[in-house]
Every structure is written in structure tokens, then in C-alpha cells.
Amino acid sequence: MPRVMADRTYGAWAPATTEQLAGLFAGAPFPWWITGGVALELHAGRSWRAHGDADVGIRRMDAQAVRGWLGALHPFIASNGELRRWTGGPLSAGDAENNVWVKKEPDGPWWFDIAVGEGDERSWRYRREPSIGRDWSQAVLISAGGIPYLAPEIQLLFKSKGRREKDDLDAQVVIPLLDHDRRRWLEAHLDPGHRWVRLLQGPPTQSGGPAHNV
């Protein structure tokens, strides 16, 4: 099922900053985290490329609480190549309702994308293969600035299925920063012939890393 892509076909983007998203979700009664390429930058402690959108992760089980938290913002479900207004109902995994795009104004640019994740109270689950999981304490980390973000090995697992130049660049920067546990976890869930395996088997370098786990 194709995902609507973050491009100008569906209107312009003016991505929120990480600080704006942290402010929007501060005090929320549900877990949330930065995802996408910016999550990798939070782990590395630096930036190396531009980003055309901004991404926030949530658990599917919290979707209705998230809709209430968004208040007067304008969220649209992005599914199967279409956008439709989200009125607050549950988001269906079976219907590929895995992303919600949000605007500040009805006719304004897109502000950020909500990536709907799988899991329960204890652990994150990989939507593409539910047998793959990670305790939330390992799946969501906290940056030195106090911002939650998706663990780099999980973010790279999502990126590993594509052939985009930016994903390879992200892997080249971030994989050398991963500790032994995160390297072995990612390697275990990649195909043996994947182009990133050689990177995972190379020597580590010092990581900026998170301030601490959740």
C-alpha cells in the first residue's frame, strides 16, 4: 500500500522545528518522540543534511488522545495515495492509516507528519514484521536537550528497505556511532547481503548518544 509522499503534489511544506514540536507536545499524557532523519541527528548530536518535513512518532493505541491534544490544528490521514481529514476516530492498521499530516491553518502549508507506531505498554513492534520488537526503554531515547527520539537502529531498520541516497548517507554517518548492542540488533534484522552490513561490522567511533533511555 503506497504512502502519500511528503512532496508538493499535496501542497507545500513549512516543517516545524524540533523545538516547536517539543513545545507542542510538552506535558502530553501519552508517549511521543521525534522520528525520521531528525531522530538520527539527535542521536549524533549534529546535522548533515536538509529535511523536507518533520516527523513525530506515537503509539497507535494513543491515537484518539493525540487527536484531542492537537486541538484546533488541522490533521489529515495520509493513506493509499489520498489525504482525508481526521475527525478523531481510531487509526486502522489494516487500512494503512499509518501517517497523519498536520497543518496549523486549513489553507496553510503542512507543518509535521505523525508516524503511527505499533506496540503495547511494554514494547515497540515493527509494523512490517510484528515478531521484531524492542522494549520501549530501548526504542525511545532522550537527547542531551531532553527531547525523546526513536532509537537509531530502529530508524535505520525502517530506512533499510529503500534505495534512497539520503538513507545511505544517514547510515554512513550514524552506524559508526552505534554501540555494540544497537549494531548487533540492526544487523540481526537486515538481510545478510544488505549493503549496510559491512558498515555494521566496521569499527565504532565515539557517539554523541542520548542523555539516557526513557
Image (spheres, rainbow, N blue to C red):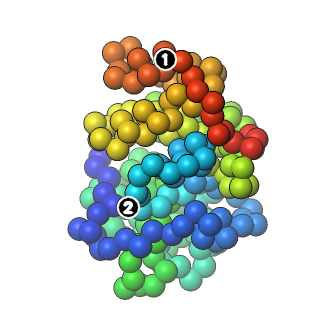
Q: Closer to the camera, 186 or 52?
A: 52
Is 198 situated left or right of 29 in this image?
left
**Is 131 situated above or below 85?**
above
Label located before the other in sequence (2 or 1): 2
> Circle 1 — which element?
loop
Which mark is nearer the camera, 2 or 1?
Answer: 1
Q: Residue at x 48, y 15 (%)?
A: 201
Q: Looking at the picture, how far across and down is residue 107, in whole percent?
A: 37, 85
Q: Looking at the picture, how far across and down is residue 71, in whole percent?
A: 60, 79
Q: Closer to the camera, 139 or 91?
A: 139
Q: Closer to the camera, 149 or 180?
A: 180
Is 97 situated left or right of 124 in this image?
left
Q: Which residue is mark 2?
A: 52
Q: Residue at x 30, y 41 (%)?
A: 165
Label placed on residue 82: none
Looking at the image, can residue 59 be seen? no
**Is 125 situated above or below 5?**
above
Amino acid on which the number 2 mark rests in the picture: Gly
Amino acid on which the number 1 mark rests in the picture: Gly
**Is 12 situated above or below 29?**
below
Label placed on residue 202: 1
Q: Looking at the picture, how far across and down is residue 211, in whole percent?
A: 74, 44
Looking at the image, can residue 93 be seen? yes
Question: Which quadrant does the C terminus fall into?
Answer: top right
